[in-house]
Amino acid sequence: MSASLIANVVIAGVLTGLVYGLMALGLSVIFGVVRVVNFAHGEMMTIAMYAAVLLFGAFKLDPLLAALPVAALFFGLGYALQAGLINPFITRPEHSQFILLVAVATILTNVLLMVFGPDARNVQTDYMLDSWAIGQVLFDKARVFSALAALATAAGLFAFFRYSRTGTAIRACADSHLGALIVGLNVKHLYALTFGLGAACVAVAGCMMTLLVEVTPSVGPGYTLLGFVIVIVGGLGSMPGALLGGVLIGVSEALAGLFIDPSAKSMFSFGLLILVLLLRPQGLLGRRP
Amino acid sequence: MERNNGMNRRKFSTALAAGGALTALAPFGIARAQGGKLKVGVLLPRSGFEALIGQSCQKGVDLAPEVIKSMLGVDIEIINADTESNVNTARTRAERLIEEGAHVLVGAFDSGQTVAIAQVAEQRGVPLVVNIAAAPQITEQGYKFVFRNFPTAGELVKNGLSLIGDLFQATSIVPRTAVYMHVNDTFGQAMTGGIKAILPRLTQLPFKIVDTIPYDPAARDLSVEVSKAKATNADFLLLVCRLNDSIVLRREMVKQRWRPMGLIDPGSPGIYEEQFSKSLGKYADYCIDNAPWFNPKAELTHVVEAAFKKHNPKEHFVFHGTNVGYTFEAILIAADAFKRAGSTNPKALADAIRATDIKERVMLGGPIKFNAKGQVEGNQSACVQILNGTPKVVLPSFAAEAKPVFPWPEYKSA
């Protein structure tokens, strides 16, 4: 097996993993602060993918640019979803939250099916099937652009949480719900902001994904599951952990496909999940409870 | 040539001419081929994960009564039932159709659902004419009321591989190696079993398979699989796929600058479907699928295509031809048997179906004649190549609409 083959496979795994990581980042941020597991995460990404496809169809807007308006829209929708629907469930048992978000996911999938039908849809940019070559090693342009967009979005989010007053307040909520209430923070507003930010992350990831895959109404649950695997491996609630988890899953699937059997790729990501749960239950970069 | 009571070219043309008169006279109740209607219960997966193809088959159902009335003068009443892409639903819907008075059942595209319906048909003694389903066991159970006008999985593979030999002969190209990639689901494994069993026996095929790469049909990313396939340096890619994965895979080939002599599918769906060409644009061109196909030059195909356009003005017949053609032929078989039996008695209908001999066809193949097992032998595949975004028959030569292009224009030998 040649070194260039291994290099190509690892590079593709890292680049795709970064986009997966961005998708999981939204899930991790929402759980880390609001303590609600968003079971409709993949479905939300599917809607973002359709939004990118529609914008491309109507205005020939490149998904890299469409990510901005779609993220803004999703921020608003995420805020409204948290403020209007999820906040009343915050103090209810976890199974109520679970059922609520599974119901939201099911409704979203079926609405997409009714509106768009079962056909696969995609965008066709001029660079989508192009690649850069350095010797025998290829860099798929769509993957490179998507990964850079994922890194930029993640960096922006880190900076927001680290350096802005609102970000600090949100982190305070994450550290202690009661403490945040005592010091007079508007926790419900901050929760809604957080959900909005998580939704914006998933919107950017969805726009990037349209450069890599086709979208159908039924792809959502697969991405929700993938998001869970990534955040559990990286550490539920840890932002760097989500990106690391994405890259690890991307690379481990790629290498398992190369060295063992392509059909067994998913088996290895779940194997990694079990290994992490056994050896480091809080995830690679998660904090011990 | 032996003459019979079934359809032949002359009778078909006469019937078509007479059809116009019959249609004109029908409103006045002057001309009727016979008393009563044939109630055909049609079972298709019109919703669920197979909805796209089920709805495509349904287009063949929708046009059948009108065309068959003009051909045979037979009145047909269609009773539709949706299997919801589910085996259990297919079984209960078949029961219900029989309760509602269906004289004959037609369906059901999916092998699993068809097996379930066949059991009901046999138990209830109502004939089932299978439109599309390849699982061999459907006609291997000794059933007396089950008939199939569609190749079995083994025939599909054999037809597909034979056409690869014909393609190489027609283009005077002799590839020595192939890398075989396939979806790792029930269908993909059945096709793989068939290829492994049949390929060594087809000594006219000059190539050997250097690597077999199975992949998950739900895979979001096939970069690793394509990297492995590219690394084999095989002359061409032999691919058994579904629609979505075929698009992902072809895209990945372009991204990884893998330019083999060609991509040949020995008989699975995907490549000839509209979405493949829509999604890939110019990169869909020159891909080949050796699939069961309609005869674009047959007289009856033109009649069915005209009816299809009338019912579906925005759709292209070429992307539905296989589904529409086989479904239409299934209903034609039932109607032809009804006409000859002169009765809706299930036993009489089954006996008449068994004696079917329809020569004028939409689909490629010999006459529709059932063997003792209720299977039509001799259904053919066509070598279909995407040219300018449209599937075109390039082989067999008698049905060809264009010359095959192989290797791909972009191919450069190493």
Image (cartoon, coloured by chain):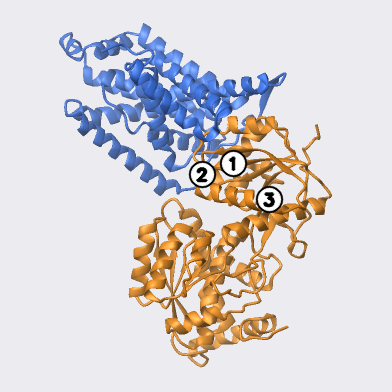
The colour with which the image depicts chain A is blue
Q: Secondary structure at mark 3?
A: helix
Amino acid type, label 2? Ala
Chain holding disc 2: A
The image shows residue B275, relative to residue A87, as above or below, that is: below
Q: Nearer the viewer, residue B359 or A166?
A: B359
Residue drawn at x 50%, y 87% is B341
The image shows residue B95, relative to residue A24, as above or below, that is: below
Q: Which residue is mark 1?
A: B247
Asked if disc 1 and disc 3 are in contact, CB closer than 8 Å, the reply is no
Amino acid type, label 1? Ile
Q: Position of residue B291 (x, y in %)?
A: 64, 56
Q: Which residue is mark 3?
A: B199
Amino acid type, label 3? Leu
The colour with which the image depicts chain B is orange
Instruction: Tell which tag, 2 or 1, sits nearer the viewer.
Output: 1
Q: Residue furthest right?
A: B172
The image shows residue B379, relative to residue A43, as above or below, that is: below
Q: Position of residue A229 (x, y in %)?
A: 39, 26
Q: Secondary structure at mark 1?
A: helix
Q: Which residue is mark 2?
A: A120
Q: Position of residue B337 (x, y in %)?
A: 53, 81
Asked if disc 2 and disc 1 are in contact, CB closer than 8 Å, the reply is yes
Is residue A249 something that shows in the picture?
yes
Q: Position of residue B412 (x, y in %)?
A: 80, 35
Q: CA distance from mark 2 to mark 3?
A: 34 Å
